[in-house]
């Protein structure tokens, strides 16, 4: 059974063999409404994983995966960090060369077999 807050997913109608009681369903929906969460049982999470991941990506939803009506895992959007790629790493030090790399090599700097 799914409880949801957005229109990203549609919940199937409740069946007689549902392991959750009406009280736990009511509590799950209440919590889902408060925190923008989707609550699913383990079997449904396995069978609808790609749909749940799509809801997390597009709707900034959080999916709570439950086993026997108790939350065991949480699927939420990854934290996005921005990296300024133009700023040099503070660990790196400037390279200092003691000569002009563009100047030609003298005859004594060449190996004898290449002179």
Image (cartoon, rainbow, N blue to C red):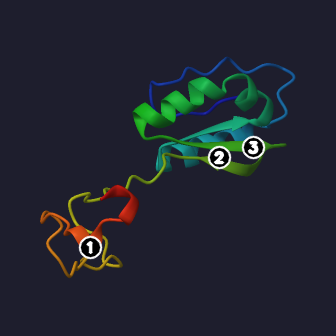
Which-is-in-front pick, marks 2 and 3?
Answer: 3
Sequence-wise, which precedes: disc 2 or disc 1?
2
Q: Residue at x 36, y 79 (%)?
A: 91
Q: Splitting the image into 4 quarters, where does residue 51 fall?
A: top right
Please give the residue where the numbered disc 3 appears in the rendered image: 66
Q: Position of residue 45 (x, y in %)?
A: 71, 31
Q: Residue at x 58, y 30 (%)?
A: 52
| Crowd tier of the residue under label 1, counting other residues whose Cα lies within 10 Å: few below 14, some 14–19, many 20 or above | few
Tag 2–tag 3 contact (CB < 8 Å):
no
| Viewer-proximal residue among 87 and 12 | 87
Tell me how far mark 2 sits from mark 3, CA to CA: 13 Å
Sequence-wise, which precedes: disc 1 or disc 3?
3
Instruction: Answer with left or right where residue 100 lies relative to residue 82.
Output: left
Q: Splitting the image into 4 quarters, where does residue 81 fall?
A: bottom left
Please give the residue where the numbered disc 1 appears in the rendered image: 108
Q: Position of residue 1 (x, y in %)?
A: 71, 28
Tell me how far mark 2 sits from mark 1, CA to CA: 86 Å
| Viewer-proximal residue among 10 and 16 | 10
Please give the residue where the numbered disc 2 appears in the rendered image: 27
Q: Kindly tell me whether residue 94 is visible in this rendering.
A: yes
User: Mark 3: which secondary structure?
Assistant: strand
Quadrant (top left, top right, bottom left, bottom right) of the C terminus: bottom left
Q: Residue at x 53, y 23 (%)?
A: 9
**51 is higher (above) or lower (below) than 107:** above
Instruction: Answer with left or right where residue 39 lies relative to residue 91.
Output: right
Sequence-wise, which precedes: disc 2 or disc 3?
2
**29 is higher (above) or lower (below) than 52:** below
Q: Residue at x 73, y 22 (%)?
A: 47
| Viewer-proximal residue among 40 and 75 | 75
């Amino acid at each position: 059974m799914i409880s949801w807050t957005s229109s990203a997913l549609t919940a199937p109608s409740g069946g007689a063999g549902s392991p959750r009681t009406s009280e736990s369903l009511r509590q799950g929906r209440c919590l889902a409404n408060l925190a923008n969460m989707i609550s699913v049982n383990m079997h449904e999470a396995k069978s609808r994983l790609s749909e749940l991941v799509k809801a997390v990506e597009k709707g900034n939803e959080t999916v709570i995966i439950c086993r026997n009506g108790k939350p065991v895992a949480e699927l939420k959007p990854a934290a996005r960090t921005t990296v300024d790629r133009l700023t040099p790493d503070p660990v790196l030090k400037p390279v200092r060369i003691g000569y002009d790399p563009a100047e030609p090599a003298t005859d004594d700097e060449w190996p004898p077999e290449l002179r």
